[in-house]
Amino acid sequence: MIQKNRVRPFTLLLMVIMTVTVVLAGCQAQPSPQAEQTRKVETASKPPKEDTTTPPPLNVTLRPHSSGTVTDYLDVEMKMPEPKLESGKMLVEIPVMVTSIPSQQYKESDIKAYDNEGEIPLQVVEGKSKLYGPTIQFAPQRATSGDVTLSYRAYPRKVDSTTKGGPYFDLRQEADGLNGAGNSFLALPDDSKNYTIHLKWDLRHMPAGASGVWSYGEGDVTKIGPVSILANTYYATGNLQKFKTSEDSKFTIYWMGEQEIDTKALGEKVGTLFNTISQTFKDGDEPYKIFVRKNPYDSTGGTALLRSFMFGYSNKVTPTAESLQLMLAHEMVHNWVDMQGEMEDKTLFAEGAAEFYSLFESHKAGVLSEDELIAQLNKRLLSYYTNPFNGETNRSLIEKSWVHHAAQRVPYGRGLVYMLRLDDQIRTASNGQATLNTVVLELLESKAAGEPYGKKELFNIIDGITGKGAAVGFEKMAAGDMIVPPESYFLSNYKLVETAEKQFEFGFDDTIFNEEKKIVKGLIPGSNAELAGLKNGDEILSFSDRNEIEDIATKSFELKVKRGDKELNISYLPRGKEVTVYQYVKK
């Protein structure tokens, strides 16, 4: 144990409904090569309050169809209980895009609807969702009568070596089957009430041995909740293979076809982590599933949804179980951590907590040694303090993360330091009787009771332990003020030191990485990029992992560029001026 007489604080956190298509720094859909950050989407809405009555049934049947070697489409049938809609009112809708991923672009003729009076003529209406932006809505051209049955067909998205990386929402062919998130292929009704959802797999048109899995279970599953749980979960069908740490484990990893990664080693490591984290968070009996897909394009990362995570990788860089364990631990924490409020506040709170818990829970589980824990913590501190966007406000970071890769990552470091400081302050003020866990527990108890659980409530809980000042400190940090880790956080064998390191600097306008053709512009005179020979007008054909060069101060940026009819290899250290960095070192 490396903390001073401390029981490590971990929170009892409830389910995070992952629904909003906003950028969460470093977890989102910035197209990028090789091992980029994971992507995820989180909730800005609150699920309907539970009542004592049994919600009406919503029956959903998924009927995949195989042509022999591949699954070529997925038929969807949905029976809705008496929607009682007037003509022109929305029956179902689907996002046009889920962040950067196109959904199924259904037309009027693609969706059939029937009620007591026969077929319902539908019209397409342009809609808008607070969560997804533009949507495709389907509205009846007459009033509905009784229950409504819908049917439509979803086709897998075509991807190849030229496809840009992005979050893993798309319905996609994988080996002989399909996998994807519901938000990209399910047209769903209004999300304002709970249903008793009966999800059924009809596998009559699949080869022998095929199965169907939803984030909430294998085969036919019944689950009470709003329709957003259908949208924000994963589905997979085909000749699925799986690994569980034990028969009674809630954790399962699924894949199809031959994989380059060692799925058993990955399952063992991540399964051990899940068991530790879920016990710490006092998780219930619901399953947690990880789905694996192999990308034909150069991208590695993942996307977290409800009770599940989709991980993807390419053949170019095959990750190991060791290299993935912290990323997946981070994503699993998002299954529990949540806070109401503006997206910039939610992002910092959620990402900071995920960084904090993924490190210390991994140490608790025996996956990280003490030295490895400190090394990983220092790596994150280095990345934060050398980030050129670390003086931006939280709100500005949300906007800039769409176009600047480094801006995506500031909430991770800023949030981690905030959590370290907050835990230290609470322990000091309470003489060790309270921890960060105490605060988050109370916040999440409010959520469970259907009460507010946002920034105001967070500050009230903290002030009740430490005295006044929680709001002032948070708002200064949110405005871009630099914060410093606590000096006395670890045992006497570690101390906090102040060092100088070079700030991360591409040396040119990095917005070009969002373009189809990456033409160098805005080259900074005297920068290492210019000194290495890079010129405005060069076309970047390939480049090394941006996460690595941001995390490792001595890592060179490797580029292949086209200048005229020549191809050139350029390598340089992407660093600029000296800045102050804080690190923990042994005494």
Image: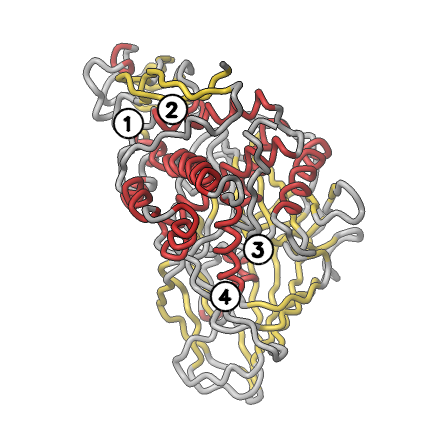
Of the two numbered discs 3 and 4 in the rendering, the one whose residue sits closer to the viewer: 4
User: What numbered label is drawn on residue 519?
Assistant: 1
Amino acid under label 4?
Pro
Secondary element at tag 3: loop
State whether residue 91 is above or below residue 34.
Answer: below
User: What numbered label is drawn on residue 233?
Assistant: 3
Report the quarter where the N terminus lies: top right
In this rendered view, identify the residue nearer to me: 255 or 24. 24
Left or right? Give the position of 531 relative to 333.
Answer: left
Secondary element at tag 1: strand
Residue identifier under label 2: 541
Left or right? Give the position of 277 relative to 559.
Answer: right
Of the two numbered discs 1 and 3 in the rendering, the one whose residue sits closer to the viewer: 3
* Residue farthest to the left, as pictured: 525
- The disc, 3 or 4, on the residue closer to the chain's N-terminal end is 4
x 40%, y 23%: residue: 382
Q: Position of residue 291 (x, y in %)?
A: 63, 44
